[in-house]
Image: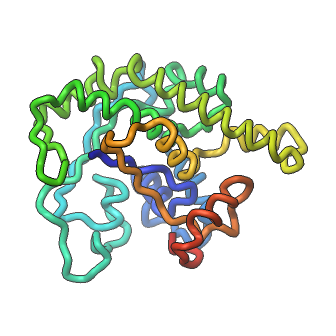
């Protein structure tokens, strides 16, 4: 199986990630920002940094590696970033992760306007398309694994052991996750699907969107976890080995609106928790 880590609309760690990478981790505190402001700031900094270093091509080749034995919760949230808070990865004193390493491999720059902006505008997609890339990758990766790792060793638990060469094939710029010709068609399909589903919600709740600005804001909102789950249920075949890790967003239900408010109440109330616990 492989794991998809979805975006968290009000992620507490996201702002620390981008701020840390901008060398101001200790200069700011979450106390004076709401969680919505934190994620908005993180995206703003990420976009600014990306546009500052915008290359001719969208491919990214950075890698970040962290020994599991040295991992903390904050480091796991941003592999390779300096820790702001030292917390054990399991939250239990005295427990340590298993041997191995956490590896982040960058593939395509979601903010590369010459490559992705036209499609984003066509489908009125969010400026930050990480959720849409998650949806696209959920379709692409199982296919690539089937094609590229025929000789991979399957363990008793069902996991695949990939060699470095097999992993390079998976992320290759020729037929892999760095290949725009491979990724863009699935990304556009995810954009189309998201746009159509949001249009259906608007049509069924017209009173909630009396002005064009409100409608457009809803269409361009960040991809929600429940939307990725809906996509996986509709598009990803059972047995494909895809697992999607979601945050419990019930602690933030008071700030949710429209379909997100309905879905959080329906699906996540059972997990409980208070504000800031997510």
The residue depicted at 19 percent of the width and 65 percent of the height is 70
Q: Nearer the viewer, residue 105 or 261?
A: 261
Residue 252 falls left or right of residue 28? right
Direction from residue 229 to residue 66 in the image, left or right = left
Q: Nearer the viewer, residue 123 or 203?
A: 203
Q: Is residue 251 above or below residue 165?
A: below
Counting the numbered discs, the total is: 0
Residue appearing at x 19%, y 81% in the figure: 94
| Residue pictured at 67% horizontal, 32% vertical | 196
- Residue 52 falls left or right of residue 68: right
Report x, y in % for residue 169. Answer: 21, 26
Residue 156: percent from left, percent from top: 12, 52
Task: Write the residue at 26% across / 24% down.
Answer: 172
Residue 176, image x, y percentages: 30, 24
Q: Is residue 186 above or below residue 35?
A: above
Is 27 situated left or right of 96 in this image?
right
């Amino acid at each position: 199986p492989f794991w998809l880590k979805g975006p968290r609309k009000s992620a507490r760690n996201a702002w620390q990630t981008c701020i840390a990478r901008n060398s101001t981790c200790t200069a700011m505190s979450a106390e004076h920002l709401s969680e919505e402001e934190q994620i908005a700031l993180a995206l703003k900094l990420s976009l600014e940094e990306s546009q500052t270093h915008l290359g001719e091509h969208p491919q990214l080749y950075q890698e970040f590696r962290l020994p599991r034995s040295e991992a903390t919760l904050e480091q796991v949230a941003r592999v390779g970033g300096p820790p702001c808070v030292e917390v054990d990865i399991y939250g239990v004193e005295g427990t340590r992760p298993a041997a191995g390493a956490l590896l982040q491999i960058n593939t395509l720059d979601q903010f590369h306007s010459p490559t992705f902006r036209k499609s984003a505008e066509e489908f009125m997609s969010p400026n930050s398309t990480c959720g849409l890339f998650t949806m696209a990758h959920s379709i692409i990766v199982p296919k690539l694994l089937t094609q590229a790792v025929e000789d991979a060793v399957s363990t008793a638990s069902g996991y695949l052991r990939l060699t470095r060469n097999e992993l390079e094939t998976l992320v290759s710029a020729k037929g892999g996750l760095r290949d725009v010709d491979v990724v863009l068609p699935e990304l556009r399909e995810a954009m189309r699907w998201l746009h159509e589903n949001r249009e259906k919600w608007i049509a069924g709740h017209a009173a909630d969107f009396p002005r064009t600005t409100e409608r457009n804001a809803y269409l361009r909102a960040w991809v929600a976890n429940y939307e990725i789950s809906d996509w996986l249920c509709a598009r990803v075949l059972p047995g494909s080995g895809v697992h999607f890790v979601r945050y419990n967003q019930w602690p933030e239900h008071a700030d949710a609106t429209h379909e997100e408010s309905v879905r959080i109440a329906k699906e996540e109330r059972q997990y409980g928790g208070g504000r800031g616990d997510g």
